Amino acid sequence: MKDVFIVADNIVSPLGLTTHENFTAITKGFSGVKQHTNPVLSEDSFYASLLDENIELVAGERSHYTKFEQLLIASISDALENSGVNIADPKTIVIISSTKGNISLVENTVVTPQIKKRLALHTSASLIAEYFHCANTPLVVSNACISGLLAILVGKRLIQSDQYDNAVVVGADVISKFVLSGFQSFQAISAGPCKPFDADRNGINLGEGAATIVLSSNEEYSQGIRITGGAVSNDANHISGPSRTGEELGQAIMKAMEDAGVTAGYIDLISAHGTATVYNDEMEALAISLTGLLSVPVNSLKGYYGHTLGAAGIIESIISIQSLQQDIILPSRGFSRLGVTKPLNVSVELQESPLKTCLKTASGFGGCNAALVFSKSPPAPRRGGPGL
């Protein structure tokens, strides 16, 4: 089966408007998570990673495009620059990942047929296609918090099935009162900066941003990283609560490694979903244990970005790719004392280490789970480990 290469990427977040700015900020220990007092979003103050309201994402387009669409356009535009990939080529597909899109349009207004049409994700997809003169209708992937990873996996499979040569995968979400109040109703919002896998964790921080990853079968454009494996699963445990055993995320991890042709001993880094909720972090720890990966360094990036929903899987995949390229393991911000029942090897400081292969995981409402494997080209055997 043909290789799928990473050829370009971008991250737009409170930490920067390019991948380089974002990765540099994290290596310096900066976080976008801050305390906010904004009565438009919440009567109470809250911690989140929010973009500056005055930032100009797409010059002169504030009136025509929503903030969500501006994020998509800005991220795609930067990623495509000098990528070698033509987004208007019939052999290029655009895949859009989001959980809530333009949901803020229904706040404080009468919901008319026009609002309903504007709210639909396929309407935003059509506007993006028109802006970039795409030859193909974009695909929309919206499957809770695995949306970003699933969109990347869909792109990989479309290229490997010879339907397309390139895939421009972009994800974005904006924090609105609708989104924030929903998580507040679950009592899932942390009273301070989140602490993934920590004994004192008590909930998530939300975040907003966008990210784009450009995939291609053309090695000429390659950054030296391939997507070598991917899989999804569903535990069907509860509409909002994850599996209590971790078996189903474990199945996705195992299938992803099998797809990549690697065993546990090849994995050098795990970029976990790590939301800092009690049940998610425990479930991930169980899954990592079940798949023989407890000795592998693990980090969560939620302490830097908050939970960026439909953008999370793409943002965190790009940061993982940067870690592979630069042989750097990033610390899991907010972690100090292990608070899960399995002895995870949570990264607590920035480390330089030879890296070849990274596992990225995600889980979401409805019991969905996803795992991707990213590898340097060509792959090389790493340390010994269980032949799972």
Image (cartoon, helix red, strand yellow):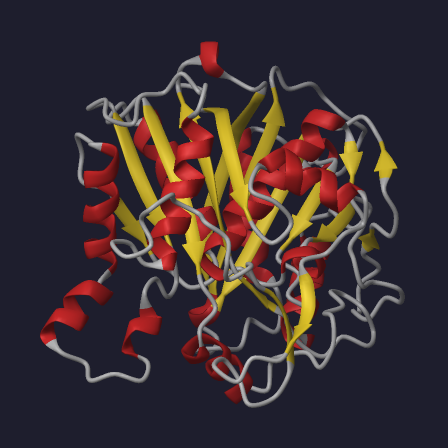
Q: Quadrant of the C terminus?
A: top right
User: Is residue 257 at least partly visible in the picture?
Assistant: no
Pick the front one: 155 or 116: 116
Q: Position of residue 232 (x, y in %)?
A: 45, 51
Q: Is 53 situated above or below 387?
A: below
Pick the front one: 387 or 13: 13
Pick the front one: 138 or 83: 83
Q: Is 321 situated above or below 192?
A: above
Q: Position of residue 242 (x, y in %)?
A: 55, 72
Q: Position of residue 194 (x, y in %)?
A: 72, 69
> Image point 13% across, 78% down: which residue?
112
> Image point 52% across, 50% down: which residue?
313
Q: Position of residue 15 (x, y in %)?
A: 65, 49
> Image point 57% across, 37% down: which residue?
18
Q: Quadrant of the N terminus?
A: top left
Q: Is residue 160 left or right of residue 317?
A: left
> Would you identify the image quadrant in which residue 19 lies?
top right
